[in-house]
Image (tube, coloured by chain):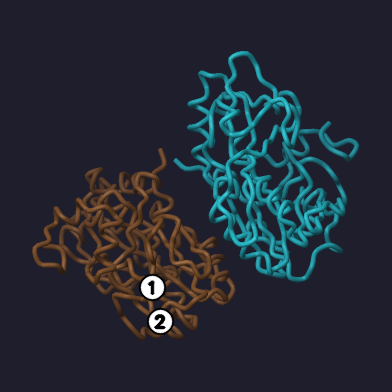
Chain colours: A brown, B cyan
C-alpha cells in the first residue's frame, strides 16, 4: 500500500496516466509520488511573484546541475507546457507556502495562496535517474530501505544571481565501489535531471562533517564497500530562496512532486 | 593569411591564448574568428537593456537547441564568467547595433553603444561541433569552400516568451549519406553547442522552398550523394529580437565571435 486512499494498490498507481493521477491529487489525495506513473517525468515546483522570476531564472541558468529547469510558466498562467490542461495550483498532492523564507502553510490546494502574477518553475528531479540506476543494476539504498534520500548543505557556493546566493545542496547515494563508474555513466545521460555526480568519495571535501547527520531527508544507508556519491540536488533553489528571504514562494511538499505528461526517455542522451 | 594585420599567419592565430586574441581585438583588429585559438569556446553575443533581459532569458530556456546559453552577465557588468578580465564592449573584433530591430551601426568598439544596464548573453556556436565533425572525419563543406554556412528561416515556430516570438533559424551542412549517423552522434555530444540536428533530409518539410537560396550566409555546397542536415542556429535569437523590434540590442558582427577562456572539451558529453 503506497497511497492514502483505501483499496489503492501499487499496481493501480503504476497504471494511471499522469492526467488521471493529477485528477486524484486535485480531488484531495495527499501522498508521496514516488512509484506513481513510472516512465513519466516528475518535477520539483517553485513558484515566485513575477518581480523575483528573473533572479530565479538566472540562478537556474548559472547553476544548471542543481537547478535543471524543464519548464517555466508565463506570469499568471497555471498551465505548464509539459502537461497541457493541468493546473499547477491543485494538481500536486501537497504544497508548502513560504513568507520571507518562513514556512507558513502546508496545503493540498494552493489556489488561495497563488498570487495572480506568480511564475512557476518546474525543475528536474532525481526520480528519473534513480529508475535508470536501478535498471542498470546499481542499487539505490534509500529506495530499498524505504527512506528519503539524505541531503547535505555543502561548502560549495552556488554562482549568485541578483538577490539569490547560497550553498549547493547535494543528495548522497551510497554505491558499491565497483559500480561507481556505472553510476556516473548512467546519470550522465540525464543532464536535465541533475546529471553526473558533482563529487565522489570524500564528504569532508564538501564540508560535510558527519555523513550520518544530513541537513534534509533521512539518515544514509551504506553497505560495506560502498562509496558515498554526491549529486547536485533540486532542494538547492528552495534552500536559497528560503535563506535570502524572498517575500513569497510556493513549492511542492517534500516528495509530493508534479507528474508531467513527458516521458522520462525524452531527457536521456544516447 | 587569415587576418587583417600584415605579417600575421594562420599559425600565429592558432597559437594565441584567448586573452591575447581579445587584446588584439581590443586594439582594433577586425577579423572573422574562425580558426583563432582552436580548442577554446567561441560564443555569439547578444546584449539587451535590463528590462528585456527576462524575455530573452526565458526565450533561451524555452528554445535551448537554438539558444544554448553558456553565460549571462549581471546587469551593468561587462565581464563574463567565461573570461575573467575580459570586457565585452571591446574584446570582440566587431559589433552590430540595432534600434527597433534596424541595424544602425557596425563598429569595432561598442563602448559608446553599451548602455549602463545592458545584460549580455553568450550563446554557444557551431564552431565547436564543426571541429568535432572534422576530427571524426565528417567533411564540413562550407569550411573547405571557404564560405559561410547557409542559414534558413523555417516554418517551425520557436516557443514564444513574453514579447519574443518567431521562426526557428537553422544552419545546413551537407553530409555524405553514409556519414549522417556519425554527424548525429558527434553533435549530440555537444548539447550546449546546438546539439543533434533538428532535421535530416527534407528541406520542404521545414518550409525551405529552395535550398540554393538561404536567408543568411552563403549558397550551400553539396557533393553527389550528400544529404542536407539541419541544426538549430544561434542566429535565431538575433532574428527574433530584430523581428519583434526590441528597442535596443548589441550583437557580434557576423563571424566575429567572442573567444572565451573555456576549453571546448568542457561541453562534450562522454
Please, is residue B171 above or below residue B52 in the view?
above
Please, is residue B15 above or below residue B137 in the view?
below
Residue matched to label 2 = A98
In front: A76, or A137? A76
Please, is residue B47 above or below residue B139 in the view?
below
Identify the mark nearer the N-term, 2 or 1. 2
Q: Position of residue A238 (x, y in %)?
A: 41, 73
Residue matched to label 1 = A251
Picture residue at 46% right of the left edge, 75% below the top? A240
Q: Could you tell me if residue A194 is visible in this image?
A: no
* Residue B72 located left or right of residue A104: right
Q: Position of residue B128 (x, y in %)?
A: 61, 40
Q: Are marks 2 and 1 in contact (CB under 8 Å)?
A: yes
* Residue B184 located left or right of residue A251: right
Q: Could you tell me if residue A89 is visible in this image?
A: yes
* Residue B108 located left or right of residue A20: right
Considering every residue shown, the one lying at the far right of the view is B6
Circle 2 Cα neighbour tier, 10 Å, few/some/many (<14 / 14–19 / ≥20): many
Amino acid at each position: 500500500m503506497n497511497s492514502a486512499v483505501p483499496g489503492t494498490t501499487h499496481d493501480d498507481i503504476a497504471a494511471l496516466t499522469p492526467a488521471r493521477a493529477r485528477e486524484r491529487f486535485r480531488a484531495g489525495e495527499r501522498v508521496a509520488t514516488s512509484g506513481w506513473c513510472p516512465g513519466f517525468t516528475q518535477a520539483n515546483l517553485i513558484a515566485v511573484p513575477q518581480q523575483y522570476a528573473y533572479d530565479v531564472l538566472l540562478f537556474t541558468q548559472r547553476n544548471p546541475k542543481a537547478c535543471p529547469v524543464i519548464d517555466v510558466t508565463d506570469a499568471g498562467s497555471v498551465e505548464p507546457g509539459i502537461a497541457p490542461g493541468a493546473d499547477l495550483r491543485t494538481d500536486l498532492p501537497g504544497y508548502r507556502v513560504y513568507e520571507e523564507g518562513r514556512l507558513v502553510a502546508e496545503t493540498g490546494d494552493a489556489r488561495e495562496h497563488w498570487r495572480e502574477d506568480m511564475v512557476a518553475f518546474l525543475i528536474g528531479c532525481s526520480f528519473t535517474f534513480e529508475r535508470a540506476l536501478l535498471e542498470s543494476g546499481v542499487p539505490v539504498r534509500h529506495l530499498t530501505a524505504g527512506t528519503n534520500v539524505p541531503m547535505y548543505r555543502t561548502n560549495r557556493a552556488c554562482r549568485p544571481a541578483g538577490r539569490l546566493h547560497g550553498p549547493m545542496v547535494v543528495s548522497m547515494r551510497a554505491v558499491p565501489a565497483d559500480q561507481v563508474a556505472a553510476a556516473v555513466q548512467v546519470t550522465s545521460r540525464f543532464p536535465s535531471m541533475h546529471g553526473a555526480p558533482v563529487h565522489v568519495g570524500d564528504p569532508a571535501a564538501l564540508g560535510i562533517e558527519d555523513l550520518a547527520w544530513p541537513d534534509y531527508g533521512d539518515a544514509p544507508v551504506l553497505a560495506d564497500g560502498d562509496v558515498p556519491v554526491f549529486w547536485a540536488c533540486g532542494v538547492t533553489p528552495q534552500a536559497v530562496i528560503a535563506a535570502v528571504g524572498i517575500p513569497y514562494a510556493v513549492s511542492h511538499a517534500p516528495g509530493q512532486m508534479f507528474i508531467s505528461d513527458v516521458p522520462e526517455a525524452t531527457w536521456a542522451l544516447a
